[in-house]
Amino acid sequence: MKITQIETHVLLVPDYDPEACSSAQDDIVVVVHTDEGITGIGEVDTNPWVAQAMIHARGTHVLGLGLEEMLIGEDPRNPEALWEKMYRGSFMTGRRGLGICAIGALDMALWDIRGKALGLPCWHFLGGASKKHITAYASLLPTGRTASQYRESLVAKAKEAKRLGFRVGKMEVCVKGPYSHNGLQEDDELIVEIVAACREAVGPEFVMMVDVCYCWSNAKEALRVLEKLEFYDLFFIETPLQLDDL
């Protein structure tokens, strides 16, 4: 089996806003074709036009190759080796960020092909099943351009998630920092207030997770607030620090 073609499709909501912080309004889907008629589908959440360019771009030297040109003619049933080939071949242009995102979409499609070729779901190749079921959680993204609107929106969504039968929810409390929602730049006390309001709304048995979207620039700032949030029994805090903070 050989890879013969790679398609990329940019998906956008009709009224997407380039100034918004929601990554739910765009996506790129890749379709990897083979000479045996089996196709694999993958996707990734990043700027779809830039990922598309990364995939289809021609290479200029051995560490700056295009991802598509590295895959054409290869056997897709060995995704681990092809991941290494793409990573090494794009070493000067990838390694992190966009490069890993674009490789990830193609890697997903390669695993899809492998599963289809063998007639097995991909989890068979990724360590097997560790449990018979998983718990779904509600991902709660509030609206509102003021602090009060934002808080009220998230509390309402948390109550609705519980009413619908969810036992777990992840609250987006992104009111400061580089990825804040709708231009909000509030203080840390609002984060604590919103988490407290959500906990009161859903009760003690509901499992809460909170995403603060890279809002603190260092661990000292983060810990000062996390100590206050400990009272509300959160399962985890997502992205408290910016990506390159070591």
Image (tube, rainbow, N blue to C red):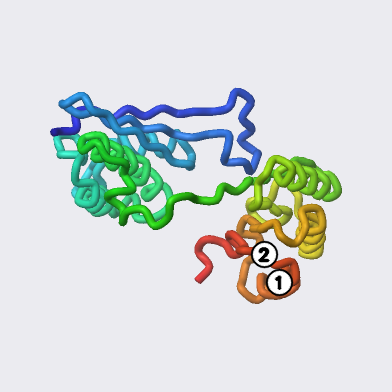
Q: Residues within 10 Å of mark 2 (few under 14, many from 20)?
A: some
The residue at the point 57 percent across, 41 percent down is 23
Real-space Cα separation, disc 2 to disc 1, in angstroms: 7 Å
Q: Residues within 10 Å of mark 1 (few under 14, many from 20)?
A: few
Vertical position of residue 60 compared to residue 242: above or below? above
Q: Which residue appears at 20% of the width and 29% of the height? A: 34
Evaluate if marks 2 and 1 touch, with contact meaning CB atoms under 8 Å apart. Answer: yes
- Can residue 182 be seen? no
Q: Position of residue 137 (x, y in %)?
A: 60, 48
Residue 147 lies, in percent from the top left, at: 83, 50
Residue 123, which numbered label? none
Q: Secondary structure at mark 1?
A: helix
Q: Residue at x 41, y 37 (%)?
A: 43
The answer to whether 149 appears left or right of 135 in the picture is right
**Where does label 1 land, which residue?**
230
Q: Nearer the viewer, residue 131 or 33?
A: 131
State the image coordinates of residue 153 (x, y, percent, origin top left).
Answer: 79, 43
Quadrant of res 193: bottom right
In the image, 126 versus 62, the foreground residue is 126
Query: Secondary structure under badge 2?
Result: strand
Q: Residue at x 33, y 50 (%)?
A: 93
Residue 55 quadrant = top left
Horizontal placement of 70 versus 197: left or right? left
Q: Give amino acid for label 2.
A: Leu
The amino acid pointed to by label 1 is: Glu
The answer, for residue 43, to whether it is visible in the render is: yes
| Residue that label 2 marks | 234
Q: Position of residue 198 (x, y in %)?
A: 77, 55
Tell me the quadrant of the picture where the N terminus can be found: top left
Q: Nearer the viewer, residue 241 or 137?
A: 137
Q: Is residue 25 left or right of residue 133?
A: right
